[in-house]
Amino acid sequence: MGVTEGLVIDLDDLVAKAHQADVLMLSHMRGHIVDMDALIALARTHNLLVIEDCAHTMGAKWGNTWSGRSGIIGCYSCQTYKHVNSGEGGLLICNDDEIMARAILLSGSYMTYGKHWAGPPPAAFDAIRLVTPNISDRMDNLRATILRPQLRQLESQCRAWNARYHVVDGILANVVGLTHIQRVPQEKFVASSYQFLLLDWPATAILDMVERCFVRGVELKWFGASDPVGFTSRYDSWTYAPSTPMPASDRVLQGIMDMRLPLTFSLEDCSMVARIISEEVALVFDINGLG
Ligand SMILES: Cc1ncc(COP(=O)(O)O)c(C=O)c1O
């Protein structure tokens, strides 16, 4: 599915392709949340089950609804770079007894699912307990012990990320040559990272800008490189899954710049980082005559 200049799923593209699938795996990539009311309405019309990948939206909301509560399943990663961190691991939430029973059996319950405080009733397991394989992907007690105190701190952590976002955003919102990502009030995002676009910039100018920032200690990731670096893989990076070119999305991907907003950065650090980016963007924009 394509991506818009607002860095969310292209709903027109979703409508065009909806007949090809029963399930939509919706990734709220880098915490950008599409209009979930519109998306869920479209999913209902087209009989699509929505699974929300909330790896970047734990603690976020669309309107008054927590990210992960609009679809049939919400999945959260607890890998090192996420909003809670147990090194590896994750969890999912779901109100459907049958799906949850399957998930518990798949994760490997040693048939002790009856002891699960939040699990579905035993009847949900009866028909599937002997036909569902065990892929041993359990949330172990050690990880859960590490995660539970972090859940209590999640709200204040989210506030701290957003404070950093607003400092950076305040400086980068009006830089000539840089396309700022507009966000609507319903999107109660958690900005553990920051994105902007250098839309229609030549690759050489983008690389120059990245290098200039790097020399000044600011590391930016670019989604336009032909080879993914770190986490900058695109839909066409994964050659095991055939893909059809999406020119409008390619134009956006070609311009996406990305950086983390670690909580180890103070607000002053964030301000300095944003000032460096704004200076280098302005300079490279100018010397390349991109105006
Ligand atoms: C958007 C998104 N979805 C899913 C995942 C996968 O999470 P995990 O590594 O816990 O399986 C990641 C991991 O980086 C991610 O960034």
Image: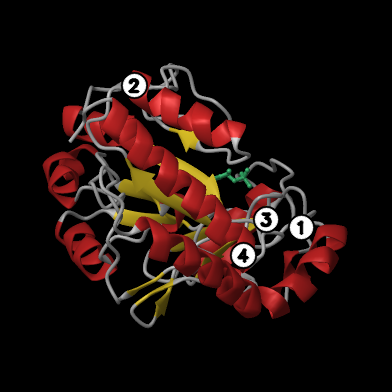
Badge 3 or badge 2: first in the primary sequence: 3
Residue 100's tag is none
Amino acid at dot 4: Glu
Q: Which residue is painted at 18% across and 27% down in the image?
A: 247
Q: Using the numbered discs, state the Cα–Cα distance from disc 3 to disc 4 in whole angstroms.
A: 28 Å
Q: Residue at x 33, y 79 (%)?
A: 63
Residue type highlighted by circle 2: Ala
Q: Tell me how far mark 3 sits from mark 2, CA to CA.
A: 34 Å
Taking the view exactly as shown, the residue that stands out farthest to the right is 142
Q: Secondary structure at mark 2?
A: helix
Q: Nearer the viewer, residue 191 or 172?
A: 172
Few, some or many residues within 10 Å of mark 3 (<14, 14–19, 20+)? some
68, above or below 106, in the image? below
Mark 3 vs mark 4: give the one in front. Answer: 4
For the residues labelled 1 and 3, say whether their Cβ atoms are less than 8 Å apart.
Answer: no
For label 1, the residue is 111
Q: Which residue is label 3 attached to?
A: 78
Name the quarter showing ligand 1: top right
**Element at badge 3?**
loop
The residue shown at (56%, 62%) is 100
Residue drawn at the location 19% of the way across and 46% of the way down? 14
Q: Residues within 10 Å of mark 1 (few under 14, many from 20)?
A: few
Q: Report x, y in % for residue 94.
A: 50, 67
Dot 1: element: loop
Relative horizontal placement of residue 237, taking residue 151 as reference (left or right) = left
Which residue is the site of mark 2? 203
